[in-house]
Image: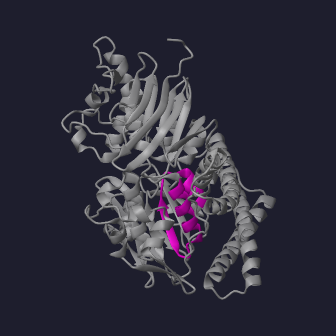
Amino acid sequence: MAKDTPYLDVQQLTKSFGSLVLFRNISFSIAEGQKVGLIAKNGTGKSTLLSILSGIEGYDTGEIIFRRDLRVGMLEQSPAFDPEESVLDACFKRRSSEDLNGRVVTEFDEVSHQEEDEKVLKAKQILTKLKVRDLSQPMGQLSGGQQKRVALANVLITEPDLLILDEPTNHLDLEMIEWLEGYLNRGNKTLLMVTHDRFFLDRVCSVILELDDQTIYTYRGNYSYYLEKRQERIDNLRAEIARANNLYRTELEWMRRMPQARGHKARYREEAFYELERIAKQRIEERQIRLKSRNVYIGSKIFECQYVSKAFDDKVILRDFYYNFSRFEKMGIVGNNGTGKSTFIRMLLGLVPPDSGRFDIGDTVRFGYFSQEGLQFDEQQKVIDVVRDIAEYIDMGGGRHLTASQFLQHFLFTPEQQHNYVYKLSGGERRKLYLCTVLMKNPNFLVLDEPTNDLDIVTLQILEEYLQDFPGCVIVISHDRYFMDKVVDHLLVFSGDGEIRDFPGNYTQYRQWQSLKDSQPSQTSKPSKTSQTSQTSNTSKPSQPTQSRRKFNYKEKMEFEQLERDIAALEAEKRQLEEALCSGTLSVDELTEKSKRLPLLKDELDEKSMRWLELSEIGG
């Protein structure tokens, strides 16, 4: 077979489940060295398409052609292992499947005696990067996230010609995700993957496939390029529909006037009418408004974390940690897996007791908690009934309210899908339904633990907008860097062993600061953990290192002190603006003026905070 033959060529592929058509007559190809990202809404067939390509699932019609002798490695969304086999054995387990013609599509070879040492060494290296260190541990003792990482190692170790990856960043912390980015970008690897991680898509993929309305669209660029060209496609389609609607009204009059017996020209015009009707009745399912709630009140006292300590045996989570949470604060929590992020919020919610200290919660606080393990539904219930059991409608304030059905529709559950049974939902649709049940309770303090896992990108954009406009408090734990940048105004960084830093900015700003810090030669010993007791109110300033490379000169000292005063004043103004904007008492002119001031104020606050950080690294 010729060298320029595509690794994979899909021709006119159709797949349906009963009357539900996932995709119809789709065609695309993947060439050697291409890194392709597949994007689609939940429930439209992303994972099904990957399963078809890897030979796990069949299809209705069409043709799938792989280059001869191509080795394909598949990472499933929820891999299954023998609970008795060890981690190392699971990494080299033979996993084969056949396509409908009986040809092996996926095959991982057993480790031969000759190459065992080399492969075991590589397995150890990759598993260490993925933070799975006990190679003799039975798979049954691992968490679901750890098993997914072993499955990822399994695929990477075998070095297949084509990698097919379903949500590879789920259950990876930020350090692992950045390592995986680098790994996939090295060499001439070929891959097709589904992921919701937009940073990952942007940095790894050179082609984007979008599965939309049973059709596939190809964009030859990264995620940023896809966003631009997709909008062009939608604008063009909208213009075509508008033109068709204008002509449709004229032709509809002609159809009503014409007698049934028509000549050749009339029949031709009649056929053209039905094609015109098809175009005119197309719908672009895009939301036209942002969902803004004004009926959320929260008092000035939120919560105070009073010198809390927590450890599990010799693993320290918190050590005399103090923090006073402010009104309207939007905090992100980041850190490697196992550093205590989820434990911290479970303590805040009263689900895990501290060893010492306490959380003092304000009387007006109503938590809404989205957890990693919260998916518990009656499988025989309809989607709409799940939400109606919580509330018939949600009060949006100002005399507005949304019914349960309207709220679900805003989160992309069509009226037809709302009357589906829960057992018919995909994994991503279940996560989205769970999110809707949390929001329908109308909380004023949202605590979201990994809310982005398995949600499609369109739903993530809706959730980002909702949180940006949310007039209450928010804490988000997430490894989705794009999502964190959109939503939070500062970070708590969990470094392990009870060390926590409060950083005044989003994740990208934190990484920029960290890179700057790492690039400068250090003359200090390991920083002491003064950050445990340094936080009094939300000053949005990280604790300073206890030692510095040199002292401030007089000018720097004056600038540093002025910056602290400026930042405190800007934060006070920001809180006042946000309270005023949420009060519902402003005139149109006042609302316009304050809305224009808020983004300018945030930019000024970011600029001064970054300069404060630069000076804090010098000394002070």
Q: Position of residue 10 (x, y in %)?
A: 48, 30
Classify the position of the C terminus by image quarter. bottom right
Q: Is residue 408 left or right of residue 399?
A: left
| Residue under the point 72% across and 57% down | 611
Is residue 305 found inside the magenta-colored segment of the image? no
| Residue under the point 47% across and 74% down | 445
Residue situated furthest left in the rendering? 84
Query: Is 118 placed above or below 594 here?
Result: above
Decide which of 278, 600 is in the foreground and name it: 278
Decide which of 557, 62 is in the foreground and name it: 62
| Residue under the point 36% across and 75% down | 388
Query: Is 144 placed above or below 369 here?
Result: above
Q: Quadrant of residue 498?
A: bottom left
User: Is residue 5 among the parts visible in the rendering?
Assistant: yes
Q: Position of residue 546 (x, y in %)?
A: 58, 56
Q: Is residue 63 left or right of residue 356?
A: right
| Residue under the point 51% across and 55% down | 528
- What segment is highlighted magenta in the picture? 458-486
User: Is residue 521 among the parts visible in the rendering?
Assistant: no
Decide which of 107, 561 is in the foreground and name it: 107
Q: Is residue 138 left or right of residue 526?
A: left
Q: Position of residue 460 (x, y in %)?
A: 52, 57
